[in-house]
Amino acid sequence: MRMREVTAGVLLMLAASIQGRATICPATELANESCPSPEEARRTFVPERKPPLLIPEPSALIKEDGPLSVAYHDAMKILQSKNQCSSFFGGSEASVDVFGNFMASLRKEYLPSSIGLKMSGDYTNVINAATQVRYRLFDKATLNTGGPFYKQKISSSTATIPPIGSFVPNSREARVLMLLHELGHLMRGRDGKWLLPDDGRSMAESLTNTRTIESVCGEEIRALAKTSPTEVVENNSEQPVSPAAATSSHQ
């Protein structure tokens, strides 16, 4: 009799371990209400869940501009997820923070049609106090209202604006590719170098950098077509939002 009781207790201990129970009860105490059965433990076990990643709240400029708002949420959707693209930018936590700060500084101007988005002036070195991620922000980040972010042609009598990577200008995919291109100029890789070298004085280098981002993020960018722009904005509006916290110092 004693041997059967011990054997039953061992089996129950093994079952409890498999089911992830915090308390192991001998067979003689199963009637005790403080010691749940394996079935009860299985029903009440709750796996640990990570809190959702906070998205920086978009600026008024972004909220009031339909194409820009969709592009912001499209890019955030890519960077939020674990994929090849977000990994290239140092992971979701780092890239979402940097992208949010970059977009918060964005302004709009009319520039030559060949320019989609331009960053210029001195830059500030930034350190995120929570993640210790280091990046830079330029004095000016200008989105061209007369360029490929918003237009395919300057006028009905002129030639079309060149594509952005393999995407036609003024398309959902082209806009996200342009924004991620600029993000690459702000962040460093593991080797300490900028993910994308400066290309403001060379169209050829700019095209090369765009191809680099498309080679890494193209799959995620193309997948955006499976989701309607309205659905993207609505889904992201339900996410918790918070201003990105960071400290900075001029170089």
Image (spheres, rainbow, N blue to C red):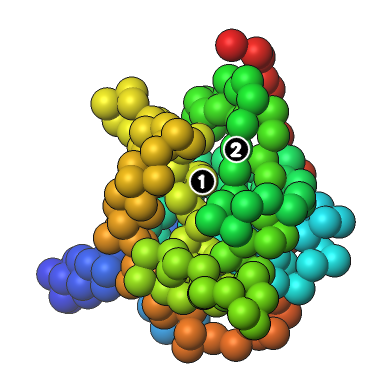
Looking at the rendered structure, the number of numbered marks drawn on it comes to: 2
Read off the residue under disc 1.
182
Residue type beneath disc 2: Met
Is 43 on the left-hand or right-hand side of 202? right
Residue nearest the viewer, comparing 194 with 202: 202
Residue 156 rendering spot, x and y as whole percentages: 64, 82
Alpha-carbon neighbours of circle 1 within 10 Å: few (<14), some, or many (≥20)? many
In terms of secondary structure, where does tag 1 sit? helix
Pointers 1 and 2 in contact (C-beta within 8 Å): yes
Q: Residue at x 66, y 40 (%)?
A: 141
Picture layout, residue 244 above or below residue 137: below
Residue nearest the viewer, comparing 74 with 24: 74
Quadrant placement of the N terminus: bottom left
Q: Residue at x 41, y 79 (%)?
A: 223
Residue nearest the viewer, comparing 8 with 107: 107
Residue type beneath disc 1: Glu
Residue 2 rendering spot, x and y as whole percentages: 18, 69
Read off the residue under disc 2.
119
Is 32 on the left-hand or right-hand side of 140? left
Is 17 on the left-hand or right-hand side of 149? left
Is 27 on the left-hand or right-hand side of 51? left
Q: Quadrant of residue 163?
A: bottom left
Residue 56 rendering spot, x and y as whole percentages: 70, 50
Q: Give the Cα distance between marks 1 and 2.
A: 8 Å
- Residue 215: mark: none
Q: Earlier in the sequence, mark 1 or mark 2?
A: 2
The answer to whether residue 172 of the structure is visible from this angle is: no
The answer to whether residue 110 of the structure is visible from this angle is: yes
Picture layout, residue 108 above or below residue 190: below
